Image (spheres, helix red, strand yellow):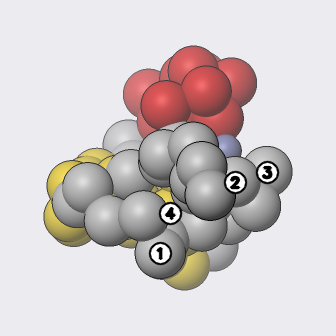
């Protein structure tokens, strides 16, 4: 999960949502503040975590 610095504030995005925001990332020059593999993190967009949690 990457923490993106965007004009609307920082947001975590998973890889799937990152692809969907490709245009904004380029046009608004978003940059990555952190790149963490942390199962507790949730994507700001789809609310999913980076990893499947299997009980
Ligand atoms: Zn997502």
Whole-percent x, y for residue 26 in the image: 44, 28
Of the pair 55 and 50, the residue shown nearer to us: 55
For disc 3, the marked residue is 46
Report, in whole angstroms, how far the alpha carbon at label 2 lies from the one at label 4: 10 Å
Report, in whole angstroms, how far the alpha carbon at label 1 lies from the one at label 2: 10 Å
Whole-percent x, y for residue 17 in the image: 64, 35
Front tag of 1 and 3: 1
Report, in whole angstroms, how far the alpha carbon at label 3 lies from the one at label 2: 5 Å
Q: What element does badge 4 sit on?
A: strand
Q: Give the mark nearest the N terminus, 4 or 3.
A: 4
The yes-or-no answer for disc 3 within 8 Å of ligand 1 is: yes
For disc 4, the marked residue is 12
Q: Is residue 11 left or right of residue 8?
A: left
Residue 48 circle label = 2
Q: What element does badge 3 sit on?
A: loop
Front tag of 4 and 1: 1
Ligand 1 appears in which quadrant?
top right
The yes-or-no answer for disc 2 within 8 Å of ligand 1 is: yes
Front tag of 2 and 4: 2
Q: Are marks 4 and 1 in contact (CB under 8 Å)?
A: no
Q: Residue at x 50, y 63 (%)?
A: 12
Q: Quadrant of the C terminus?
A: bottom right
Q: Give the mark nearest the N terminus, 4 or 1.
A: 4
- Asked whether the viewer can see residue 43, the reply is yes
- Asked whether the viewer can see residue 24, the reply is no
Q: In the current view of this chain or complex, which residue is farthest to the right?
A: 46
Q: Is residue 6 left or right of residue 54?
A: left
For disc 1, the marked residue is 40
Q: Residue at x 42, y 64 (%)?
A: 39
């Amino acid at each position: 999960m990457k923490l993106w610095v965007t004009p609307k504030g920082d947001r975590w995005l998973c890889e799937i949502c990152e692809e969907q925001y490709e245009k904004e990332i380029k046009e608004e020059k978003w940059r990555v503040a952190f790149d963490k593999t942390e199962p507790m993190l949730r994507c700001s967009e789809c609310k999913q975590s980076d990893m499947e949690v299997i009980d």
